[in-house]
Amino acid sequence: MYRTSSSLGNFEDKVLQKKSKILMLAKTDLFAECLTQAISARFQDQEVVSLSDADGLLDGNLVDLSLVMLYRMPTAAFPSIIRMIREFHPKAAIGLVVEDADDLDSSIAGFVDEGLIHGVLPRNLHLDVCLTVIDLLMKGGEHFPAALLRRLAPQGHAAGGLVAQQEAVCESIDLESGADIGKGVLTAREIQILDLICMGTQNKIIADRLGLSENTVKVHVRNIYKKMNVRNRTEAASRYFRSEADLGSLRMPSRWRN
């Protein structure tokens, strides 16, 4: 009876070992715990592992990482953390959860420009959008807040980094032609608003940022829903990120990409 239990345990261990893993490398707080639980519930085909110390990246049992999520890691430790991930887990995508993309430390922003970080997720993202972005990262996609890309644009062009490469790809794209999503074609203004919707931004704030009236924003939002054949913000964000992953290439200027 003991041997049977042992065999079953070994079998379960082997099954777990075959699962790809999502690693949450974070200084633990309530937000980190809640996000980890949400990831576990959403991605049941993945084993979710939590670590608070970057030295755990060197654990020989930590294999088949599909994604590493970083949160509240010391800025000074970032170079060594990125180096360890790249050396010991080269196939893993890297996502960074931040308080505010506008206030991201310049040294960390440099890793984004160098293409070493594949996604930046502000904490104010709605949970369903956040999980959609995580899915996108695991499929080889990227996600960067528009505000961060605008901030990196000057140095990106000078250094030939991520922003410069993305802008160069998009130079031949006619903004007025918009992006094909769903049944319709989104205009440049609708793309701007869709990006802000994906960040969880409310209509009033969108209006303020873009210098529009709130009623004008509402009209644009209704047009976006109609063209994308969706009913609400959640469906719009999900379809947007899914469309990007399926296309596998930029369909709009990176400065509006979110």
Image (tube, rainbow, N blue to C red):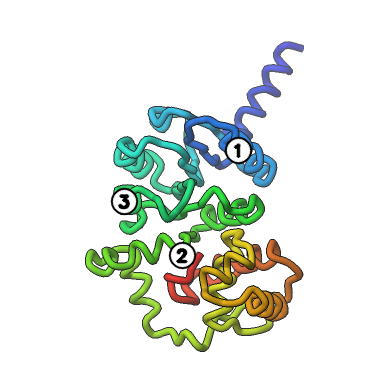
> Circle 3 — which element?
helix
- Please state which of residues 151 and 8 is positioned toward the viewer in this rendering: 151
Residue that appears at 55% across and 31% down: 29
Farthest top residue? Answer: 2
- Frontmost of labels 1 and 2 is 2
Does residue 229 appear left or right of residue 139 in this picture? right
**Amino acid on which the number 3 mark rests in the picture:** Ser
- Please state which of residues 169 and 146 is positioned toward the viewer in this rendering: 146
Q: CA distance from mark 3 to mark 1?
A: 27 Å
Task: Identify residue for label 3.
Answer: 106
- Frontmost of labels 3 and 1 is 3
Task: Identify residue for label 2.
Answer: 146
> Circle 2 — which element?
helix
> Circle 1 — which element?
helix
Residue that appears at 41% across and 32% down: 57
Identify the disc placed on residue 36.
1
Asked if labels 2 and 1 touch by Cβ distance under 8 angstroms, the answer is: no
Q: Which quadrant is the N terminus positioned in?
A: top right
Badge 2, how many Cα within 10 Å: few under 14, some, many 20+?
Answer: many
Q: CA distance from mark 1 to mark 2?
A: 25 Å
